[in-house]
Every structure is written in structure tokens, then in C-alpha cells.
Amino acid sequence: MHASSLNPFRNPSSVAVVGASDDHAKWGYWLANGALRGSARRQVYLINGSASTVQGQTAYNNISALPATPDLVVLCVPPRFVHDVVREALACGVKAFLGITAGVPDEAALGAMIRDAGARIIGPNSLGLFDGSSELQLAWGHFTPGPLAIISQSGQLGSEIANLGARVGMGVSRFISVGNQLDVTAAELLADLSDHEETKVIALYMESFTGGARLVETMRKLAAGGITTLVLTTGASDGSQRLAQSHTGSLTSALDTVDAACRAAGAIRVSTPTELVNTAHFLVAAAKPRGRRTAIVSDSGGQGGIAADTAALNGLETPVFSEALQGRLARILPAGAAVSNPVDLAGAGEANLHVYADLVEVLLDSGEVDAVVLSGYLGCYGEDTPSMEDRELEVVDRMGSIVARTGLSLVVHSMSAGSAAVTRLWERGVPTFNGIEFAMRTLASAAALAATPGRKLATPVRSDDTPRPGYWAARGLLESLGIPAPAGKLAQSRDDVVRAAETLGFPVVLKAGWLEHKSEHGGVKLGLGSLEQLLAAYDDMFARLGDGDYVVEEQDLRANTVEVLVGARSDRDFGPVVTVGAGGTETELHKDICVELAPVSKSTALEMIARLKCFPLLQGWRGRPATDIDALADIVVSVSEAVAANEHITEFEVNPIRVAPEGALAVDALVLTAAAVNA
């Protein structure tokens, strides 16, 4: 459908509310009341089968009785009547419906009827919609126009977000409860915000992510246009909650994948409605931080210490200042004041309120930080001592000017919740919070955008080859991708084992190549240093496991290796994803992983590796030489591209990859196809 098919949901020329009521306790009252508020902009028709007037306006018995065909019909009737009302409306030429009613029988048939007529529907089971720019309100409650768009799969949660926004003075540009998404999807409604001038930031609540790849691309385009999407979810994306047959699938959670999607989209995932509203308020009021380097300034040593701990918990950096910067700070503060970061005012604020602004100016001009957090009493001076209010506001105005000049971030944690100074701080582009945890969490979320502004996913050359099952075939795939593996031979008999030993160097490894988890079934034997040991291992495996494709490989004996897992799989909602993590037989124990949407570039692969807890081992731990991280990154790229290019591959895991200073070697691999998983 073209974007024009959504116009009736943005600014309809006329609206008909079916089920309009005078009863304040009914949805029909609020829908009619809201529609009538926009009657100066559009014709409003109220339909009630048993009343001649509703809310002082003429009421019609049915849609056929209307003097003209409405642009948008709101369905607020008992479920059993919905099909008949829609059928009548379509016969009259209606092309758009807002379905409020829940529990509509045979929704699939309703959707087919609407689509066959070339019409659209938001819902059913929608809490309604609002557009501040067109004075369109078809929802329960009251909305104030503002910069926050809300698209929610839960209508009530969407209303909570709107209410929380109202409490901090942030109104709503557009509110849409998507309901059951029988026709119009959240991705379409997101895309429809790209030219909505009033929208500056978007709140998106989703419980499932069907069609997630389209959502990601839509959010990425919005981010490129300056509109950030804040994603709130329950973590119940069932696309990642299926039975997994590899470490790659079992280690990742739904939220890992949603987080990867947000990074690719240039979006931010938040955990609660409060965090969402705080972050939205920050993004609307202030410049986005350029990084995570944070200076902490406090007029209390205790508050400064807690601020530093909270910053660390949220992934913010609190670097030690250079000696030169510490010297400049020391000249402003009393002797003995802490100046390394955090900075303790040591009572200087009470003596001279302008010390706050002096410190902010020195820090933001230093080039050593991306943001400053002030924690403590600022905001309370004028509230507690009214004679100080004007001086405090002067300091606030000065800090606002410094922020505007530098383009950097200043965040305040104030012990006051709503003083004149706190209000002025927000007005001057300085986000201010009553709890240090809110200040740091919000700053960290906003700072994440600097590191993950979004990336367009490449489209690799498609491959239609269906990989054969088993480890020997997986080795062939590794070879085709240029991923090094140990020298090896296929053995289907005892004689094959002998011939393999003649061409390979000892020690060797024997594997039962058809097993997905070899070590769990005694299907792998390491350190076989002679033909006699190799044959004994083969005889034992054959007796227990029977016929099959056995593989004999040279064992990697290189020193200073680190074992890493690289895997990729096809997520039902978001498509291909790639995982890198600590590898080996203890992979599940470590749970040290990073996930991104696939395919990834070399630079993204390197970023993933750098986020691992085991990264210091790869860099060279306690005097050990650094490993070949570039070679590992090349494997991450190749595996991600392989799954992205071949729809037959559901999972592709290389584990472990032994990364040494001399390069990376894949010593085991597993490839699963859709046919194998469903067999």
C-alpha cells in the first residue's frame, strides 16, 4: 500500500464514530467527545442505533443513513456486530477503519474483507489514536500536543507513557495503539512519522517483532533524519525462544537480539516507561553526548562517590583528569579539594554559587570529557532560601550558555524535584533529575547513540546451495569461505583411518563427524600420538557409535591460543544474526557473547570482539603475546555473510576457533539447515 492509504489516520476530512454514547463510563463517550474537539477541522458523524442525539449532536442509526461517506470509521460496537458494520461501511465506500473493539470473531475473515475492498484498518483491539497537529483525538483521556510520538502494541502502556510525559511537560505529537495489527503494522506507522514535523522522538512498545527486519530499516532511516526511536519491550520475542541445537542459538536471549537490532537501527532500548520518558525528555531538550567520558562534580563527597559508582554501573567512563586540568580546577576550589574526577567542591558552592558554572566551563572546554554531571544541592538554594533564587538562576543561565556554546552535555542531579532553578535548567537545555540513577542511566542511553548511530545492512551475493550434513561437509564450507582449518581426512572404515595416518602429522584428533555435540557423546578423542592410539580410539568409537563419517585431523599445538566461538543463525523475526564469544566446551558456563544483525563489516566485527570480557586474553594477558585479532574478525565477517546469503542455513557455528599470534584456526564446526532442523 502507498503511504497515502494512511492519510485518513493522520488528518481525516470526516470521522464517523459507530457506538457513540452519552455514558461517561463507556468508550463510545470518549471517542465521540474526542472527535468533536476537532469538529472545526472536520465533519464528525455520531452513530447510535437507539438514540437521536449524542452529546448534543445529531445521531444517526447507521452508516448508510449518513449524508456523506466518512473518511474514517471508528468501530466501537460489541464484537458480534463488527463484521456487519464493516460490510455496510465498505458498501458505502469507506476506505479506513479504527478498530477499538476487542475479541472480534474470525479476525482473518474481517481482514480479508477489508483488504479485498482496498481499505485499511488499525486494530482491532486498539486503544485509539491522537494527532496533535491535526486536532484528531480518537482515544480515552486527554492529550497535550508536544514532540513525543507513541506507537504501542499495548494501548494502556502507551497511555502510561503519555501520562508520564505530561508530568514532565512533554506532550504528544502522535499516539497510535496498533492493537492486533490485522492490517496496518507498526513499521508502516513508524515510517509515516518521517515527515511529521512535530515529532522529535518516538516511543515504540512492542511485545512481538514479526517483520523485525523492516522495523530496523525504518528506524534506521528515521535516525538518519534526526528522529530517534526508543524501544520498550517485554523480552518475549518468540523468534529467539525456539529450541536451539547449537551453542549459538542457546546462548542468546530475545533481548540480545532486540539490542542488536537497536544498534543496527540507531535506536535505544529502554527497560521501563519512566526510563523511556526520561530519555525522550533528554533527547528533546539537550544535545546528544558525543561519547561516554564523564566528569562528576559534587558538593558532597558521598554523593560524588555514589555518582561515580552509578556511572560505572551504566557503562560511563570517569577518566582521571590530566595534571594540567587538575591544576586549573584546583585554582578554583579550596585547598585540598578533590580534583582528579570526581570533583568535590569542598564547600565552595555555598561561598560562591558561580563556582558551579566556573567548573562546568573549565571541564567542557578541556577536551577531556564528553559530559559533566553535577550532583547535589544545586537547584535547592533558591527553594530553601528565597533571597538566593535570583543568583541561582543567574548561574543556571550561565551554564546554559556554556552548554550552547560547546555543544556538549551537562546533566544535573538535584535534591529538588521542581524548583524554579530545576525548571530553568530544563529550559536552558540541561536535563535535571531528582535521582542520580535516573541521571546516569539517561546519560548512558543517550551516549550509546554516539557509538551506534545505525548501519545499513549489506546484501551479500545470494547462494542457493543447501549444505550437506556432518562435520566433513562443514569443513568444506569453511574452505569455500577461506576459513583455515587443520589438515584432515575423511575415514569411513578402519583402512581409511590407517591411510589418513600416513598423510597427517601426529598427534591427531579423531571425531565422529555426524554428531552435533561430539564431546557429550564421546565422539571426539584428542592427543592421539601414534597409529596404535588412533586405531584404538577408532575401535572404541565404532563399537559404541557404529558406522558413519569419521574425521581424522592434525591437532593444533600452537602456544598462547585463546578459544573463541563464532556463530550465526537465522532469527525468525529479525533475520540473520551473528554471535562471537568465549569458546570451547565451557561456552555455556562463561556466557561471554556479543550479538549483531548480520552481515557485519570488518570494523563491526572488531567492535564485537572488543566488547567481550575475554578480549584482554586476545590482546595478550600478563605478558603473553597478542593473538591475531584481525584473523578472528575476518572469520566473523565470513560466517555472518554465509548465513545472510543462504536462506537454507539456519545455524552455522564454528567452535572453537583457536586464535594464536600466528593466526586463527577453526577446529570444529556445525552447520544446520531448515531441512535438518525439521527432520
Image: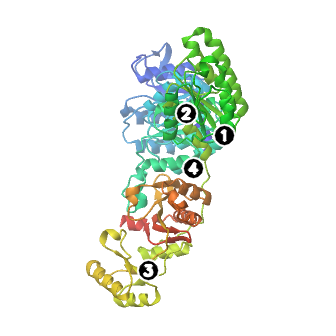
Upstream in sequence: badge 2 or badge 4: 4
Residue 608 place in picture, x, y as percent: 54, 55
Identity of the amino acid at label 3? Glu
Alpha carbon separation for disc pair 3 and 2: 54 Å
* Quadrant in the picture for residue 602: bottom right
Q: Is residue 167 left or right of residue 351?
A: left
Q: Is residue 279 left or right of residue 354?
A: left
* Quadrant in the picture for residue 421: top right
Upstream in sequence: badge 3 or badge 2: 2
Q: Residue furthest left?
A: 543
Circle 1 or circle 4, nearest the eye: 1
Q: Nearer the viewer, residue 469 or 308?
A: 308
Q: Determine which of the numbered discs, if any, sits on residue 553 in the image.
A: 3
SS category of the residue bearing label 3: strand
Alpha carbon separation for disc pair 1 and 3: 57 Å
Residue 616 place in picture, x, y as percent: 52, 57
SS category of the residue bearing label 2: helix
